[in-house]
Image (cartoon, helix red, strand yellow):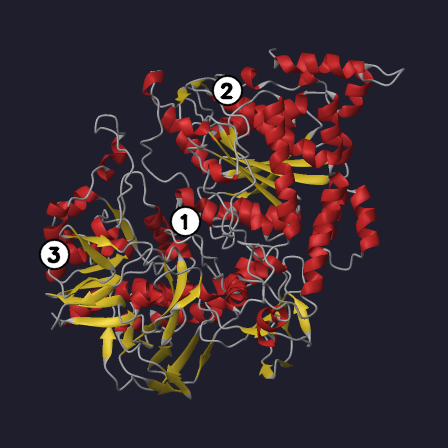
């Protein structure tokens, strides 16, 4: 049996430190299973993980974990849930045998300290003294970042097999949760890489599909929504079961000319979370750097070495900050194919953000794994040496949140700071030249602590709102993140308003207050320029994402105390049961306001029923319904569908004794083609998941089939998500991945090959629409306005050398924010939406008509000069009067333009209806023209 050479060295060093009268064997026995009984990776896998040109897959990784679980008493293997493809997601709990025997006790301590509820300071100190620090270390979230998964195999083995003093101390002080974030992706990537017998041909740049079934790389943008099963599994461990004080999320690739990015991060810093978490994050980060440097491992960078910040809540390590956990991210270079570190002159001079530069050199996978081992050890060592402080401080942060949520409090924001900056300066006759502006201290309270701007003590989500099932989906996103939600058993009054029984209450006097505020309150991103007066510095991901706004939830901010008969919700919620009202026998009427009405419609169509949209307001059984209400004629096929829907979907169906007198638009089953490409398009993947949730029938369609024409043979609707039509000019830059040759592509993937060309796609789509087809174009797929003869053109453009280009970012820049748009909900594309809606806008386009243009409908538009609701906007006044969503008639068919991303990351439930309406309305309108 082969062993890592450091094991023998560590054993010798350990022997020298033993107490008098002890033996190495005795100490090893107390520490757990002896090294010799734990199978080394080199003795289990086809090759040793870390070898050049080799990747172990998840099936092999899983089998190895099971082998280890039967060989050691330092590890317990835990099933944390199933993946999107049905694999088991395993977590290896590693600690000393004594700690593993008391896991439930230590988990209870971690929960009490993290939640802080009913725990005073003295009790917190007692619990911290008894408890063990919990450290989460994961691998493989982004499956092509192969270092992390291969490295975890070595790290787990070494933590189970080494018995040096440091390892034993770590095992005694810590409970380490080694988890894999993306089993499906590891299986796909490793198998694809290893498919060639010739090592020189191995690569994973030409993967045929996304490495998470639906969303690929965006699996690390799902943390606050937890839509994907893997995210839900991880969040359950982090925020509902184990409450780790440190969450270490490992990634690659590192900065050019360096080896690894290690925290701290650059600003901006989200002002909702407790500053303790950032202070301790900086401590851990520099402990990681110092250990690398002490071991002679050069090339680590921090802060300005990479674009990562701590603003956005959607990533695994960043969502942790809003739960009082220290979230760590490292980005390392390397992979199974050897490479070289390039010479980048700018990285060669030592500085505070790159203390020990590295010279150019050859680089192998094992080099990266050696760095990863050091980084893991640094994190665990920090946790061990600061055990009580970490445990106590997670309580302190939770207690701080509870205290702030129980009294009047204010959050400082860039807007408030700007008020101070705009105030008249104090008389500074004796001030030194260049000294900072000072203002009257009395203005602090007057300008930053206005009574109406207090942080809420609670939020109320009233029962009976127009789309209650979506409100429940929002509450479930909070619950998946460990937030406590209560429900009223009786009517109550708060803030001068009476709420019905069944309403939900989310108090801010709880440990996860930062997360709650971040989900309900607008993000106020600071103006972040490259230099004073310069262009904006791109944020890391997006700047405005308030989930309550995106989902269109009705809620009230309660600024004072709230009392009533409330019960805490024990687990995830189901929509409250709907009902059938009335005794009519002619059919049923269902409002269009509930997103779940589309599930009902799709079930009815599949059952052979004949639903239709009512084109005018209608009153039924005392309910005033807006245009778009669904009429379902009574039939044996419709009855069981309606009865099941009101039970499961939270819908109200009004039984009517006669058909509506208003006009009807009969709906028909639709054949949807969802445009995708070889390698997978994330926006299409999110939409695929969304269509499945709402039970739309669809199939993916790829460039070769699209360009072949005769599309009406297979499709009624073709859906282009953002990026599906390769962007150019004012629409952005295409980022299509590499494709293999036809001969090197397995037969099952060959139909995916190809790239859309303007010359071939334009006539194919033009003919499809004019013949009665429907095209839905979201985001930069709106470039069809450049390819087809239509009455609208992009509005946010400038002319450069005779070509249309995007506006200069110094004058217009909205990098992922939420804006307020107006909606004409009398038009079929706007049915069910309110007259004003919050819409996600990420460097998007809007539209303007040509002079005298006709045959288009302005469905949603920006009316105000200040539409920003959450995030960051420069030049937002340029949007006033431009069109966000349009309905264009072209021959017998329809082109629906949706400039903003109305279904972004499956979060923006409040604007899903634009998409869903388009999928059903276009074919129905074409059928009506026959």
Asked whether disc 1 touches disc 2, contact meaning CB atoms under 8 Å apart, the reply is: no
Query: Badge 1: how crowded within 10 Å, few (<14), some, or many (20+)?
Result: few
Please state, as top left, top right, bottom left or bottom right, where the C terminus lies in the image. bottom left
Judge left or right: residue 774 versus residue 281.
left
- Which disc number belongs to residue 257? none
Q: Which residue is mark 1?
A: 537
Question: Where residue 206 sits: x, y (%)?
Answer: 31, 31
- Which disc number belongs to residue 766? 3
- Residue 718 visible in this rendered orientation of the protein: no
Please state, as top left, top right, bottom left or bottom right, where the N terminus lies in the image. top right
869 versus 378 height, above or below: below
User: Between tags 1 and 3, which lies in front?
Assistant: 1
Q: Element under label 1?
A: loop
Q: Which residue is mark 2?
A: 366
Q: Element under label 2?
A: helix
Q: CA distance from mark 1 to mark 2?
A: 36 Å
Question: Where residue 886 sits: x, y (%)?
Answer: 24, 67
Question: Where residue 91 sits: x, y (%)?
Answer: 60, 37
Query: Badge 2: how crowded within 10 Å, few (<14), some, or many (20+)?
Result: many
Asked whether disc 1 touches disc 3, contact meaning CB atoms under 8 Å apart, the reply is: no
Q: Which residue is at the front of the view, 541 or 904?
A: 541
User: Between tags 3 and 2, which lies in front?
Assistant: 2
Judge left or right: residue 869 versus residue 601.
right
Residue name at image x 60 percent, y 78 percent: 501
Residue name at image x 78 percent, y 14 percent: 15
Q: CA distance from mark 3 to mark 2?
A: 54 Å
Reading the chain from its start, which is encountered first: label 3 or label 2? Answer: 2
């Amino acid at each position: 049996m082969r062993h890592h050479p450091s094991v023998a060295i560590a054993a010798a060093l350990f022997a020298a430190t033993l107490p008098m009268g002890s033996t190495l064997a005795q100490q090893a026995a107390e520490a757990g299973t002896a090294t010799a009984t734990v199978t080394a990776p080199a003795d289990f896998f086809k090759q040793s993980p870390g070898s050049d040109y080799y990747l172990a897959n998840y099936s092999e990784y899983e089998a190895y974990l099971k082998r280890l679980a039967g060989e050691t008493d330092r590890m317990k293997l835990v099933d944390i849930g199933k993946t999107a493809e049905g694999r088991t997601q395993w977590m290896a709990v590693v600690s000393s045998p004594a700690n593993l025997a008391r896991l439930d006790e230590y988990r209870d301590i971690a929960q009490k300290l993290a939640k802080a509820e009913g725990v005073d300071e003295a009790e917190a100190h007692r619990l911290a003294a008894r408890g063990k620090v919990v450290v989460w270390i994961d691998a493989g979230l982004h499956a092509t970042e192969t270092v992390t998964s291969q490295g975890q195999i070595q790290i787990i083995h070494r933590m189970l097999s080494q018995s040096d003093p440091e390892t034993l101390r770590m095992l005694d002080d810590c409970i380490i949760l080694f988890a894999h974030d993306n089993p499906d992706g590891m299986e796909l990537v490793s198998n694809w890489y290893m498919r060639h017998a010739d090592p020189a041909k191995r690569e994973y740049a030409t993967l045929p599909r996304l490495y998470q079934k639906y969303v690929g790389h965006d699996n690390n943008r799902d943390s606050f929504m937890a839509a994907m099963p893997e995210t839900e599994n991880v969040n359950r461990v982090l925020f509902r079961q184990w409450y780790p004080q440190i969450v270490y999320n490992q990634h690659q690739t590192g900065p050019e000319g360096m080896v690894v990015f290690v925290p701290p991060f650059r600003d901006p810093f989200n002002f909702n979370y407790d500053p303790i978490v950032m202070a301790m994050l900086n401590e851990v980060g520099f402990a990681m750097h110092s250990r690398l440097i002490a071991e002679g491992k050069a090339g680590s960078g921090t802060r300005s070495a990479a674009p990562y910040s701590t603003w956005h809540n959607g990533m695994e390590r960043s969502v942790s900050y809003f739960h009082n956990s220290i979230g760590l991210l490292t980005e390392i270079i390397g992979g199974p194919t050897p490479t070289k570190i390039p010479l980048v002159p700018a990285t060669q001079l030592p500085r505070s953000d790159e203390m020990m530069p590295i010279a150019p050199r050859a680089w192998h996978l094992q080099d990266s794994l050696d760095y990863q081992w050091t980084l893991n050890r640094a994190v665990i060592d920090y946790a061990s040496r600061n055990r009580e402080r970490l445990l106590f401080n997670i309580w302190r942060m939770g207690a701080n949140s509870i205290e702030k949520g129980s009294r009047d409090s204010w959050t400082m924001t860039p807007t408030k700071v700007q008020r101070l900056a705009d105030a008249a300066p104090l008389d500074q006759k004796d001030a030194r030249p260049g000294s900072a502006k000072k203002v009257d201290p009395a203005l602090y309270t007057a300008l930053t602590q206005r009574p109406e701007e207090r942080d809420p003590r609670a939020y109320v989500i009233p029962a009976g709102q127009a789309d209650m099932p979506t409100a429940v989906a929002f509450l479930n996103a909070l619950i998946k993140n460990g937030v406590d939600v209560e429900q009223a058993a009786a009517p109550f009054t708060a803030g001068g308003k009476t709420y019905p029984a069944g309403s939900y209450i989310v108090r801010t006097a709880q440990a996860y207050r930062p997360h709650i505020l971040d989900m309900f309150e607008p993000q106020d991103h600071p103006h972040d320029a490259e230099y004073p007066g310069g262009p904006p510095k791109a944020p890391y991901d997006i700047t405005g994402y308030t989930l309550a706004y995106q989902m269109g939830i009705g809620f009230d901010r309660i600024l004072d105390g709230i009392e009533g008969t409330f019960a805490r919700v024990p687990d995830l919620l189901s929509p409250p049961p709907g009902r059938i009202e009335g005794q009519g026998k002619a059919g049923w009427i269902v409002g269009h306001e509930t997103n779940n009405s589309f599930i009902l419609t799709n079930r009815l169509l599949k059952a052979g029923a004949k639903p239709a949209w009512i084109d005018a307001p209608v009153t039924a059984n005392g309910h005033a319904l807006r245009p778009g209400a669904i009429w379902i004629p009574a039939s044996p096929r419709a009855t069981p569908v309606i009865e099941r829907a009101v039970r499961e979907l939270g819908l109200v169906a009004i039984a009517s004794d006669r058909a509506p007198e208003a006009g009807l638009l009969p709906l028909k089953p639709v054949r949807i083609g969802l445009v995708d490409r070889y390698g997978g398009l994330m926006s299409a993947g999110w939409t695929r998941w969304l269509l499945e949730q709402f039970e739309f029938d669809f199939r993916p369609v790829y460039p070769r089939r699209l360009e072949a024409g005769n599309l009406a043979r297979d499709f009624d609707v073709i859906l282009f998500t953002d990026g599906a039509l390769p962007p150019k000019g004012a629409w952005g830059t295409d980022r299509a991945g590499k494709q293999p040759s036809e001969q090197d592509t397995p037969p099952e993937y060959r139909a995916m090959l190809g790239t859309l060309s303007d010359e071939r796609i334009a006539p194919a789509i033009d003919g499809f629409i004019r013949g009665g087809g429907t095209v839905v174009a979201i985001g930069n797929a709106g470039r069809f306005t450049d390819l087809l003869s239509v009455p609208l053109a992009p509005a946010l453009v400038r002319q450069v050398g005779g070509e249309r280009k995007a506006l200069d970012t110094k004058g217009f820049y909205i990098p992922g924010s939420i804006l307020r748009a107006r909606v004409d909900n009398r038009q079929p594309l706007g049915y069910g939406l309110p007259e004003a809606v919050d819409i996600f806008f990420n460097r998007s386009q809007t539209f303007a008509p040509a002079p005298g243009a006709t045959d288009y409908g302005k469905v949603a538009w920006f009316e105000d000069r200040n539409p920003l609701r959450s995030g960051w906007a420069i030049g937002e006044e340029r949007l006033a009067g431009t069109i966000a969503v349009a309905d264009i008639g072209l021959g017998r068919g329809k082109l629906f333009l949706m400039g903003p991303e109305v279904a972004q990351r499956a979060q923006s439930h409040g604007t899903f209806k634009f998409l869903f309406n388009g999928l059903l309305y276009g074919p129905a309108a074409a059928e009506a023209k026959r």
